[in-house]
Image (cartoon, coloured by chain):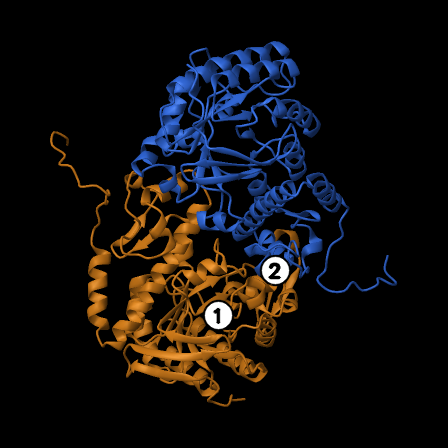
Chain colours: A blue, B orange
Amino acid sequence: MSRSPGEIRFTLLAGGDGAERRCRFVTAHGGVDTPSFMPVGTDGAVRTLTPAQVAAAGGPAVVLGNTFHLLLAPGPEVVARHGGLHRFMGWERAILTDSGGFQVFSLPGAEVSEAGIRFPDPRKEHAGREVWLDPEESLRVQGLLGSDIAMALDECPGYPATREEVAAAVARTTAWAARSAFAHDRADQLLFGIVQGGTFPDLRSRSIAEITALGFDGYAIGGVSVGEGSDLIRSVVAETAPQLPPDRPRYLMGVGLPEDILAAVAAGCDLFDCVIPTRYGRNGTLFSRSGKVRIKERRYHRDLAPVDSRCTCYTCRTFTRSYLHHLFAVEEPLGATLASLHNLHFYQTLMASIREAIEQGRLADFTARFLDRYSRPRRAATGRPRRPRRGRR
Amino acid sequence: MSRSPGEIRFTLLAGGDGAERRCRFVTAHGGVDTPSFMPVGTDGAVRTLTPAQVAAAGGPAVVLGNTFHLLLAPGPEVVARHGGLHRFMGWERAILTDSGGFQVFSLPGAEVSEAGIRFPDPRKEHAGREVWLDPEESLRVQGLLGSDIAMALDECPGYPATREEVAAAVARTTAWAARSAFAHDRADQLLFGIVQGGTFPDLRSRSIAEITALGFDGYAIGGVSVGEGSDLIRSVVAETAPQLPPDRPRYLMGVGLPEDILAAVAAGCDLFDCVIPTRYGRNGTLFSRSGKVRIKERRYHRDLAPVDSRCTCYTCRTFTRSYLHHLFAVEEPLGATLASLHNLHFYQTLMASIREAIEQGRLADFTARFLDRYSRPRRAATGRPRRPRRGRR
């Protein structure tokens, strides 16, 4: 059931050898320069943003679509009638679809067996309806969506989980990965396998051996960022990533904050996805080189500076912190849009800087400088020279 | 107290004589070709849209800002620190600000006297705070906002209202207009007076005589679209507009639906504003040449056609009705953005068509054709040839 290798065009451009690396691989919708961050387009849209805005926000090469969400609405047949997810959502570059498993496993009432997963439709208006997902069905749906990168269905335990639970998930993930490799038949779609193993090094190694033996176009580190915290994520990633094949993309699922991405890049990871830039944006937390800006705070009421003075995104070129503060204060939806747009641009700019630093062999230096500035306690910029506060406490 | 005339550069290009007309006037932020529709940017943003999206949606020459809302948040001083509302909200073309009166009069607890209006701050977190608005204060605020067109504070009765109430509002509006004309001192800001008079023709005529005697840069028909219905709006407008000075812009406040705008244009009105395109958009009602499309309806689930097949807006160029239906079904905020953008574009395209029709002397014909198509009962386009439904009821 092993897939024939060589289906992915993958090039290692710089770095490697168990450390950070600069790679490029090709999809049916263009090349992907890594390390790369993929914005999440859950329901066929990167929340609050048009595809034109996403493309302008630093130009991500890949966005992620959620198989679980699109399976429920509008249904893969409707997307297929459009000619696939690219046409449906107006996105011209690459799309990666997850397998749907991650969301299904967190549903109350999901019943898992060797055959697959039966789960209740979580939408109120479809109460009582049951949905079936298994490796073949996941790939059928991802085929109808027409993504450039499909993911094999895996079993992702939560955290904490016992050794027995994690070992069972590793075994099931391998069995499902084999079925996925056998079922996959779209020549224009890459297929990535997922390794599990939780926080147990030997189970991780076993999962890596079993999944890589099947021969996928790329490998994802699953079962992280499920509540175990940054320190455990980092140690798992540092042990896992170097064991993955050097000639395939390595995708760390669901990570994360800038500091977590930097650590994972140093361990040799190539691809990342996370809802953080858009979710934080909607909640009024904006990223800047000087750390996070919680724009709802009163101190930004009269602040004439942009969110990040060196940022070139539309939001920073056009608006002040004061304006963004105002939009959130009056609950104008444009605030979420502008903040999401800025955060996506921040992430894409960070990834471009990371790629450049790796090419120049100075990632450790870049990371140290970035984190020093990013983590320093911040004071509000006022956009005007600060007057001495004589006579005030 | 009369203002010196000739402060507005106004040109009648075509039509006139008590009927439709094609005009142009100049503001500090560019010329305005009329008839023209002004999108509403209540809180310093056209709801859900970036200024770049608003500009791309058919290029409105003027957007409207709400003095009442901006007075409360962020406060006119914060806007003035930015150099005015244009810089604050990133809008480079003209801005008209209303006087704030319309919103204040609808507040429970507002106390009106000859001097002005005292009203409770309606925001929960400022409960107990009182705010004062009078003709001079309204113009001070509008001066700080730096709009290109300011409106004189008026008293706008609701509907229905007795003859005595309307007569009192006419008298107060004249007194406040005189104070406004005296207080106004920004050479780069046009000042429009507002006529009241409700649905009483003789009170309308009295208000017109009194307000025009003061000599404003333009004249607004106020006190319409307050619940009296389309037929009464039309008869009031048909009687009022031709009595206004022919060499000044005529602004019909708060109108409206395409059919109401067409009727008012035929009566000689030049400027319009309304929340309808954006509010309808957020609620999933999209305008098309073939009438309104209620995109949440199930029949659009699989509809591969754009909202309007001949529309050139970003939404119609990029997305199907099926995709928009999906965004509203999953409550993705991008749906409101794309629908608002399309509706603004529809309105701007309609106004451009109206201007062209007036120039060519065929407005009546254009209106008849537009309404015939727009009002015809519609069937769902499927994007595929319709199959005969043999054997189905």
Instruction: Residue A321: name its quadrant.
Output: bottom right
Identify the residue under disc 1: B93
Q: Amino acid at mark 1?
A: Arg
Residue A320 visible, this orientation: yes
Relative to the observer, which residue lies in front, A271 or A295? A271
Identify the residue under disc 2: B73
Direction from residue A37 to residue B236 in the image, left or right: left
Callout 2: chain: B
Picture coordinates of residue B30 (x, y %)? 46, 75
Residue located 68% across and 59% down the image: A303
Q: Secondary structure at mark 2?
A: loop
Picture coordinates of residue B139 (x, y %)? 58, 75
Residue located 58% across and 13% down the image: A206
Picture mark count? 2
Residue located 21% across and 41% down the image: B384
Picture coordinates of residue B333 (x, y %)? 47, 45
Callout 1: chain: B
